[in-house]
Amino acid sequence: MALTKPRARLHDGHGRHDRRVRAAVVAAWSSAREFMTEPPSAGPIVWLLTDDRPGNRTQVLGAARALGLPSIEKALCFRTPESRWFGRRGASLDTLDDRSREQIAPPFPDLVIAAGRRSVPVVSWIKQASRGRAKAVLLGRKTPDGVADLTVRLSYFRQVPDPKLLEIDLPLTQVDRERLDEIAKNEPDPLAGLQRPRTAFLVGGPTGQHDLTAEFAGRMAQETAAAAAETGGGLAIVTSPRTPTDAVAAIRAAAGEARLFEWSPDRSKNPYLAILANADLLVVTGESESMLAEAIQAQRPLTIYPLHEPPMRPISLARAWIARTAIRGGLFAPLCRKIMSDGLVTPRREFAAFHRMIEERGWGRVFDGRLNRKSPAPHDERERLADRMRSVLGT
């Protein structure tokens, strides 16, 4: 089945055009061919709907990896900026650009796996067009209830129990130790020449709940470099598409001895997996669930460096109250549950609780001036997820 290259006309989710977003989608389109195995005619057809957001794509491909069936990835481009009403638009392809719509055509799948609020109208349309044959698995906290046959969310979220909800501890990833060992064996080592133990510091960036100023980034890099020096080993620092330019400059100035890998849309210049594969110790900024999950799956000692969280805005406080009320009950609980079920308010990401859970499970430790040297406890939820998806599929 042919995959049509997406247009370059893209939004960043806030109505703005962004070269980094455009580069991310084109990169996803280019690598999509790796996952476009045509299923045998007698077997189930599985579609993977992905977009420009690396976290969404990683989770979708991670779910497909757990399921273990041949699948077809469809990299989508959206012409409509995201809003909280996306999940209640109904069955529609109107949010897609023309070439993305061309991909959503018969034969329709037996199972579609997608992540994020923007995919919901497309998934609903596929279910409707297939006359109910297509089953759907939706990943993430921003998906409304009542669309998917199985919704998968992280267990630390505040959410109303539902028989179609599967809670897992960590986001799905494409990373496991077996894959990393294969990469270490067959690909160049980007950390070659660094003294062991070799520490890799994976840096994210600002989110709706976090800041990353140049001042904070410089202090963070300086403290991490000092902690790495105490181990007697070398340090590599890896930035991401979300790392601001001034933060990168501050990191470079504060940790001049470190080997710096700046993010680039050119995949050949971003040896992220090779760094994960060859590092002895890992430090990850605490705002990225996916990066933390990948570090845990790498089975190397993990240190979490939390980013600064500014005070909650009034609208965020109101949403947190709605989420608490929906769970705890009371006079307004039915209304709050309806609001959350419709996806108008999503479970808030309580990162302090997420970090505590990681520490309690023995997977890592929050930075206290020193680097964690203890290897993480094993973790693998893929079989439990695969069982639920096979049940939905009826196989």
Image: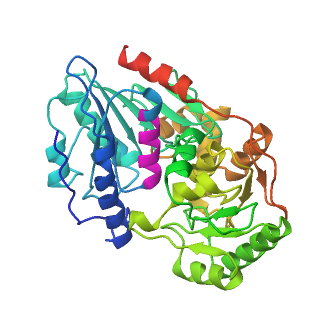
**Residue at image x 75%, y 48%?**
364
Report whether residue 330 is seen: no
Q: What is the quadrant of residue 267 in the picture?
A: bottom left
**Residue at image x 22%, y 51%?**
96
Place of residue 176 in the rendered image (x, y in percent of width and height, measured from the top left): 57, 40
Place of residue 182 in the rendered image (x, y in percent of width and height, measured from the top left): 52, 44
Q: Height in image: 391 above or below 89? A: above
Place of residue 128 in the rendered image (x, y in percent of width and height, measured from the top left): 22, 29
Place of residue 163 in the rendered image (x, y in percent of width and height, measured from the top left): 51, 20
Q: Quadrant of the C terminus?
A: top left
**Residue at image x 59%, y 48%?**
294
29 or 236, which is in the foreground? 236
385 or 42, which is in the foreground? 42
Report whether residue 213 is seen: yes
- Relative to residue 310, is residue 232 drawn left or right? right
Q: Which residues are magenta?
A: 54-64
Q: Height in image: 382 above or below 89? A: above
- Relative to residue 340, is residue 288 drawn left or right? right
Q: Height in image: 327 above or below 197? A: above
Q: What is the quadrant of residue 199 in the picture?
A: bottom right
